[in-house]
Image (cartoon, grey):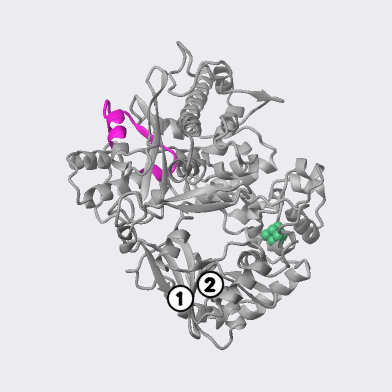
Amino acid sequence: MANPRYLTKSRFKLGLECPTKLYFTKKKEYLDQKMDDPFLAALAEGGYQVGELAKLYFPNGHDITTLDYENAEAQTLELLKQDEVIIYEPAIRFKNLFIRIDVLVKSGNHFDLIEVKAKSFDEYEEEPFLNKNGTIKSPWKPYLYDIAFQRHVLSSAYPNSTISSFLMMANKNAECPTDGLNQKFKIVRDESNIKGIKVSSTLTEEDLKKRILIQVPVEDEIQLIYDCKDSKERRERNFFDEVEFLAEKYQNDEKVITEIGSKCAKCEFKCSSEDEENGFKSGFKECWSSELGWQKDDFNAPNVLSIWNFRKKDSLINSGKIKLTDLVEADISPKHDKKPGISASERQWLQVEMVQNNETKPFFDAQGLKREMDTWKFPLHFIDFETTAVAIPFNKGRKPYEGVAFQFSHHIVYEDGTVEHAGQYLNTEQGKFPNYDFVRSLKEQLEKDDGTIFRYAPHENTYLNLIYRQLLNDPSDITDRGVLCDFIKSITKSVGSSSEKWEGDRCMVDMWDLVKRYFYDPYTNGSNSIKYVLPAILNSSDYLKEKYIEPIYGSPGGIKSLNFKNWQWIELKGGIVTDPYKRLPKMFQDTSEKNMALLTEEDELANGGAALTAYGKLQFTEISDYEKNELESALLKYCELDTFAMVMIYEAWREMIRLELEEDRAA
Ligand code: SF4
């Protein structure tokens, strides 16, 4: 039997994002683009194990595992007859509100309500949750609203009890007491694809003695929410009325009509035209059609949601300027910033103008990029890192969410145009802290010459800064510490938070910056992520098409590759080049295309995605040797393409400059 239509924690969160979503959620006809593979989501989040660790800090509790509302509630009521009791996942209901609490500690008439979050917390920060004006910092709002909701349900169900509420999070400053702690919490998948954690029987008292999770009281912050003092924004209803409103609408399956806006860009209730032809509905199109009177064709026209990095989307939508063809230059107000290439606002207006002019050819500032290229030194090196941050550290002395760099790939382009996949690194050893070996290997590969090094986005610089600090602060005996630190400084610049300032002689060049300042391909629809720029440039560059339609990659006499053989990067379907990432072997055999696409849709700053999920699978699951080999092989191929994508972009630019110079000479 289906569970009743109660407002739960996750539905409350959804309703706060946009009340209309409550109508679409879990209805078969409305496709939901959010990840629906709990096992992969747990691996991707990287912090799922903290929930299980938290339970161990409250020993002898009763675990309520059933997902059935009624059964869970009955078990909870029975346990709560005891005067002193600890319950994991108790089900508490008040009218049409229903919650499962992570840990509930009952002592007589008092409850400790503990919500466990896989989030890093700095206990030494003076006001971790609040802005200077006393309101709640935006990143904390979802967590504090969540626990405020739970507290409200618990106190409504038990009005004569007192309650203390806590968030339990990973303590940024705590040091892991033992080696291999994270390996003792394996993520497992059962037959119905539900994730779970298997705690190792080798877990010792020592493992739990020094706590890496911290219990933070949040009663004051919850009170701010209840008193409507958590924000300066005007709101229609107070917290309690909002809960009642959402619960009633959800219970009656009544659609709440809300205004469309920039929030709709990330709405999960979208579907492709193909899905619509197959009978599915798009919640997004329903909202936009009902507010704007749009017909099917209107959705094919690019609209303001796609303008790159643009903050005034809501004001344009409110003034009825939705399609890019509706805009005039003053809506964007492009301004030059006196730096080489185009500024961010000039790029935004360029995007709009190209749509208005039906321009399909990319914008390319050949002169500007040539000036940059003239400063580069051969051989050119292209590198890309894959990293993760795990809540429960791998090793003794490491802190929760310390960065882990587990993989890189490295391509070289020589002055005569020869390309080779020159090197790579991948740690797959379970429980190993790989960062120092990672840098040793990188150093060995890059120190053979002093050619220019390229990265795409700041991630590689940020991570090398992080490893530099790890090396400096590590009390263990690291014989090559100084050499590694000097190497890092030579190819990076210090990050803003660093007290020591430097910019290395061979500081990496950010190709992402070059894309943003000198190149725009309308096919990317405003994105400058390499995952969009690569397919775009493969379609617009005849040079790349002709070169890579041949199976020269990893072939004898062709381009040296460490992971591919006789590979043909160009595959044309209906005249369009297939995205090369889509032709790689599936990283996860047992999940849908949709989930895989969600994992690979990383942006350059978040750097989340498929690789760290695969690494999580290698580290935190019970995996067969066959599966391990397949996953390693897929990881190596994906990372190799990440750096080869940079090479192909470089080659296309080089050719475009050559053609332009030829044209100039001929003119
Ligand atoms: S399209 Fe916009 S208004 Fe409609 S459900 Fe999504 S976010 Fe809400």
SS class of the residue under badge 2?
A: helix
Q: Is residue 589 above or below residue 3?
A: above
Whether residue 494 sits left or right of residue 189 in the image: it is left
Percent coordinates x, y for residue 616 in the rendering: 46, 45
Using the rendered image of the protein, determine whether residue 242 is visible from the camera's viewpoint: yes
Which amino acid does the dot numbered 2 rest on?
Answer: Ile
Q: Is residue 437 above or below residue 141?
A: above
* Residue holding disc 2: 147
Rendering quarter of residue 360: top right
Q: The magenta stretch spans which residues?
A: 440-461
* Residue holding disc 1: 218
Which amino acid does the dot numbered 1 rest on?
Answer: Val
Q: Is residue 421 above or below residue 602?
A: above
Residue 76 colored magenta? Answer: no
Identify the residue at horizontal 28%, vertical 44% (top origin): 503
Q: Nearer the viewer, residue 621 or 589?
A: 621
Ligand 1 within 8 angstroms of badge 1 C-beta = no
Percent coordinates x, y for residue 16 in the rendering: 63, 68
